[in-house]
Amino acid sequence: MEKRATFSNKFLPYLLVAPQLAVTLVFFYWPASQAVKESFFIQDAFGTTSSFVGLENYRTLFADPYYFHSMGVTAVFAIAVTAASLSIALLLAVQADRGIRGKMAYQTLLVWPYAVAPAVAGVIWIFLFQPSLGYFAHLVRALGVDWNPLLDGNQAMTLVVIAAVWKQISYNFLFFLAGLQAIPKSLIEAAAIDGARPTRRFWTIVFPLLSPTTFFLVVVNIVYVFFDTLGLIDAVTGGGPAKATETLVYKVFQDGKLGGDLGGSNAQSVILMIIVIVLTSIQFRYVERKVTY
Amino acid sequence: MVENRPFGNILAHLILIAGVLVIVFPVYMAFVASTWDPATIANGKLGLLPGPYLVENYSRILFEGTGRTTRAHVDVMLLNSFVSAMIIATGKIAISLISSYAIVYFRFPLRMVAFWLIFLTLMFPVEVRIYPTYKIVADLGLLDTYAGLSVPLIASATATLLFRQFFMTVPDELLEAAKIDAAGPLRFFKDVLLPLSRTNIAALFVILFIYGWNQYLWPLLITTRDDMQTVVIGIKKIVTVQDALTEWQLAMATAILAMLPPVLVVVVMQKLFVKGLVETEK
């Protein structure tokens, strides 16, 4: 798509794109290229000299059991958060789409957690599950669980999953609701005339027609878990106990902290870049597909 | 819906009410905790109703600082969050408006190069280039400044794409008419395109303000002074997870204040928020 009519001006367009390009070159492309470059170097302990080591940082990384551990943590976290927040959001969106009264009120009451920072959400959930004084911790204890997320890795993971899901429901709910409203009512009416009950109509008509939205949300939720939950994990568990909640992004952050292992941290960054490139490409392919859908 | 099923509707209401309770309850409890004294909370005696310490707790974090843990007052943190969120949101919108204007309404060599350079920034979130970016900001002497908090974040592929898409839908006749009336490119931008983009700008502003306000990693890296902290990172320093002596009533009061501005924006401007959210993601 191109405009038929345009302005002709030699300098103005460059002037107009200059600010954005300056910011991207200085703060995006330059550091990204530095990350790639430095992933092939090792700095000495004082950060004064660095020597070229080829793929050494990558080799160390892939020989590091903690790196695979962290991949596993990220995978579990991503699957748990995506599955739980999508199913809860879909359940709620289907109810809100039934044409019942007070739909807008429900929507308002359900969407605001989008605006809560992940770290702030995390702090509230730690408080509720704080072993000695938390409200929910008491309930869990009453059920006979020895609750202490500061010591038990699985419980720590449960806690960050709960906080991440709580925050993500609002987003998924809005997109599911928009997706449901886009499904032509005539299709559902036709099925109803043919005698299909609501459950059957949902699984044979609504759910398949919703699949572009669902697929889009799966990708967005995975990106959310990968990147946006860093603040949540830092506030809730700090990656602990014993690295039980250390995701890939959190590990980059930890390993490079205070000038620690910068080469290793940069090698991890490069691998993450590849993951983002793959995820974003999938996301955009979906958008193209949807246009012709 | 197709058939009228009173029972189904009641069930729908029940499920939605349960959903709302799950969403609202944690924050309600945080609010309740922010109105009690430390002893009640520490003994696990916190009930479901607000207590009498509301004014005391909030005025303490706002005007006296949070004591042991940080010296900065929450009012300073809120101001820092507000200033950087405003710069990020307006900055992103301003530079994206003009660059998509250039890309859509001008033909110039390197036009597509510029477009792709902006578009591909989607592939490099801060999280994948943490320390090199930090180093550049440090070398430029921008640590602990508002510029350092906001400028590195104001490039925006999504906003540029959104405006580009919107400009493509503006009828060519408008430009032709403007040209006949001898309006130059700046005049056309100011008097025709900007007024047409008003709703899009507002919707985008809502999303970007929330984005800026909720930044975590970036302010954490580049602020070292207490008086430059934003409230989202300030709160983490109040809660020291391993420390049983965390003053929870103050932590929860800070959490409530930290979420209040962006949540109010979403609730008050819900239509714009939904529009902005759906459009920036497409």
Image (cartoon, helix red, strand yellow):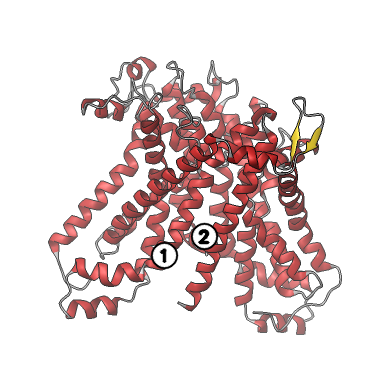
Residue A130 in the figure: left or right of residue A95: right
The reply to whether dot 1 and dot 2 touch (C-beta < 8 Å) is no
* Residue B242, placed above or below residue B27: above
Q: Residues within 10 Å of mark 2 (few under 14, many from 20)?
A: many
- Residue labelled with disc 1: A213
Total numbered labels:
2
Callout in the foreground (1, 2): 1
Q: Is residue B130 visible?
A: no
Alpha carbons under labels 1 and 2: distance apart: 17 Å
The residue where tag 2 is placed is: B276
Chain label for disc 2: B
Which of the image's four quarters has the N terminus of chain B? bottom left
Q: Chain of mark 1?
A: A
Q: Position of residue B35 (x, y in %)?
A: 37, 25
Q: Amino acid at mark 1?
A: Thr
Please name the residue shown 41% across and 60% down the image. A175
Is residue A254 in view?
yes
What's the amino acid at mark 2? Gly
- Residue name at image x 70 percent, y 73 percent: B104
Q: Residue at x 68, y 54 (%)?
A: B155
Q: Position of residue A67 (x, y in %)?
A: 54, 38
